[in-house]
Image (cartoon, grey):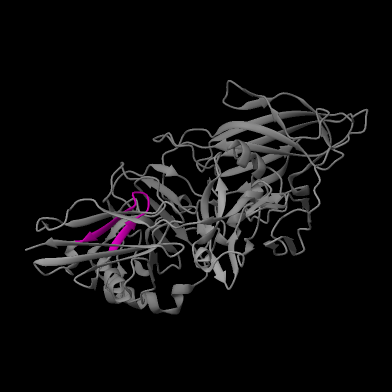
Amino acid sequence: MRLILVFLLVTPTFFSAQNQNNYPQDYFGSPLEIPLILSGTFAELRANHFHSGMDIKTQQRVGLKVLAAADGFVSRIKVQHYGYGKALYITHPNGYTTVYAHLSEYSPEIEAYVKKHQYDKESYEIELFPHTQDLIVEKGSVVAYSGNSGGSGGPHLHFEIRNKEEHPINPMLFGIDIKDTTRPLISSIYVYPIGDSSTVNNANTRQKLRLTPQNNGDYITESIEAYGTIGFGVNTTDRQDLAGNRNGVYSIQAFLNGSQNLDIDFSKFSFDETIQLNRFIDYEHYKTKGERIQKLYNDNNGLSIFKSDVNNGYLTIEDSISTVYKIRVSDFKRNDAWITIPIKGVKPKNEFVKNETTTPYYIYANSATNLKEGRVSVDFASNTFYDDFHIDFKVKNDTLFLGEDTVPMKKYFSISYDISNYSEADRNKLYIARLVGYRKYPSYEGATRKGNILSCSTRGLGTFALARDETKPTITPVNFRKDQWLSNYRYLKIKIDDSGSGISNYRATVNDKWILTEYDYKTKTLTYDFNDGVSTNTKNNLKVIVTDNVGNSTTFESVFYRK
């Protein structure tokens, strides 16, 4: 089997073109041995991105066997503190790649491969691209164990299927079945006048419509009076039968007087476009109210999930014309929820005057913009924003007021401070912070220094300031004390923390030999596995150095004994 598989993997047919309209139904098996119940669905809305896989519940446990979904070879391994944590990528002879993330550990052969490279590089975080013959796996073989590593909010397995272009695709399209007979839930519906001359109920602002559930599970709204160009937005989620989680839906369609004018399909997307989610939702409403309203019109968002639309999904309402707008929300199993919206065309008797807030500073979306006051400079590249708008900009002492984080952005922008008025000792301890929360707590944003210029790259407007960090990180042993015998211990645990700019890096040695310590930022804990075999002496000298983002450093030393 191994020799045949190697041949298949290295022949040119391995990279044959895929028919995106004909996904193999029996090729991929389940990545777990337990029934599949989801806590997250493909393409559901997350912070700044669409979810690229399915999150499978692991019964609130860590350590379940993770199985290769099909024959293939391990093509990529990535270990990081955040994001996917411990992740594994398997490429298959049909050109697809499966991804397994938030793992606790890999299978013994893969774990040994990873640790060898981690020790060679002396780094926990690592990214590896094994050769096709290095780590060959068979369908159903154990490749890892489920966990809670990285940015996971609880034990689960994140599972993806990607095509040869590295575009994630809904795994359910490949026959991976999830029980679901439950209709999507419609939480709210909104209507938007588009442009200064359009109105809804004699107003030029967003309107929330009253939803009335019907006996058949569908919804109807109050009748609205509108004129000009309008668009709609919906807050909707889906639930599967065996879980109470509110997940993403599979498709949204809209119909005007019986004719379809919009089709949004969440079956696949590319990572390059995922940041456009902030344009797809009503970003200002989300940042101020916490509710994600999905726009049912293509507001220059550049998303491929819009499969078809008439007039970009906008409606043109004429005076004295009555229309009916219907929205169909579906999950993967085609359980539907319909919304009916009666619309009466009514031209306002009086001209509507829109009050617009203006400032001395204006952003032209398609042009680069530099804002400068005193020692502070802000640089926006062209096409950082979607629209032209007035921006708030002022500097008071070392605090930069740059509006509110309610404007969606396509790119990062830079903030720079001239710190030549500070002493050299102070300059080494400065960083740029975003002031967050009611109490404007300083959160580290960056500190790249070139001469007397301190800068950072960030995405999201708000309030920023220079902050000083003179506090060293803390290091505290968790499960041992100095001069303790640890012969029966499997793990050594140490808590590290920093109250200022945050931890930048750490290094641990035993008897002057580097040891692999896994950092879990959620528990602020470093863990060393004695099975790595580095500590072979009876008496062992442990040394841990932790450095924060401005260079403050703390050294912890202790002695332990093992037989």
- 294 left or right of 485 in image: right
Depth check, front residue: 349 or 317: 349
Q: Magenta span has 75?
A: no
Corner quadrant of residue 93:
bottom left
The image position of residue 376, as x and y in percent, is: 67, 60
In this rendering, the answer to whether 473 lies above or below 339 is below
In this rendering, the answer to whether 227 lies above or below 44 is above
Depth check, front residue: 537 or 15: 537
Report the predominant secondary structure element of the magenta stretch.
strand
In this rendering, the answer to whether 92 lies above or below 247 is below
The image position of residue 495, as x and y in percent, is: 29, 53
In this rendering, the answer to whether 503 lies above or below 60 is below
Could one spot residue 28 in this view of the protein? no
At a point 10% along the width and 55% down the height, the residue shown is 488
Q: Quadrant of the C terminus?
A: bottom left
The image position of residue 409, as x and y in percent, is: 66, 54
Q: Which residues are magenta?
A: 517-529
At a point 34% along the width and 46% down the height, the residue shown is 155
The image position of residue 226, as x and y in percent, is: 82, 31
At a point 47% along the width and 36% down the height, the residue shown is 239
- 300 left or right of 286 in image: right
- 375 left or right of 6 in image: right
